[in-house]
Image (cartoon, helix red, strand yellow):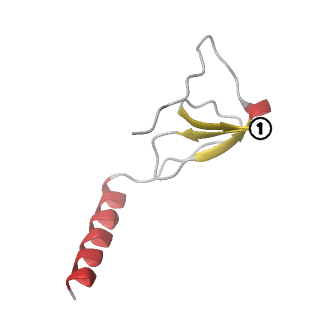
Amino acid sequence: MATKNVDLQAQLAEYMDGLENPPRTFERGQIIKGDIVAISKGEMLVDIGGRAEGVVSGKEMKLEGEKLNKKSRR
């Protein structure tokens, strides 16, 4: 029973956070900044500060005078 209560509290907290911080939307072709979390052949996993991370193919990445740095996970 205690586990169900904790799960319900976690779900409620996540729901409330969603109300206060609605998800960001992006337009096709829009350039955004993010942290590279992982790099594999032909694609990168990028954290853009949202609820989830996104996969971007290497050919879609643009470098605008900045270095690409892989973010270390802790």
| Outermost residue toward the bottom in this view | 1
Q: Is 59 placed above or below 9 here?
A: above
**Image location (x, y in percent) of residue 72:** 47, 32
Query: What residue is rendered at 64% in x and 15% in y?
Result: 64
Q: Mark yes or no: residue 14 visible.
A: yes
Query: What residue is rendered at 58% in x and 14% in y?
Result: 66
- From the image, which quarter does the C terminus lie in? top left
Residue 41 falls left or right of residue 34 = right
Quadrant position of residue 27: top right
Foreground residue among 65 and 40: 40
Q: Is 51 placed above or below 28 here?
A: below
Quadrant position of residue 22: bottom left
**Image location (x, y in percent) of residue 69:** 55, 23
Residue type, mark 1 in image: Lys
| Outermost residue toward the front in this view | 74
Task: State how many labels appear.
Answer: 1
In this figure, which residue is indicated by the disc labeled 1? Answer: 41
Query: What residue is rendered at 22% in x and 89% in y?
Result: 1
Query: What residue is rendered at 59% in x and 43% in y?
Result: 26
Residue 66 falls left or right of residue 60 = left
Q: Is 1 placed above or below 46 here?
A: below
Q: Mark yes or no: residue 28 visible.
A: no
**Image location (x, y in percent) of residue 49:** 45, 41
| Mark 1 neighbour class, 10 Å CA radius: few under 14, some 14 to 19, many 20 or more | few
Question: What secondary structure is marked by label 1?
Answer: loop
Q: Is 31 placed above or below 40 here?
A: above
**Image location (x, y in percent) of residue 33:** 54, 29
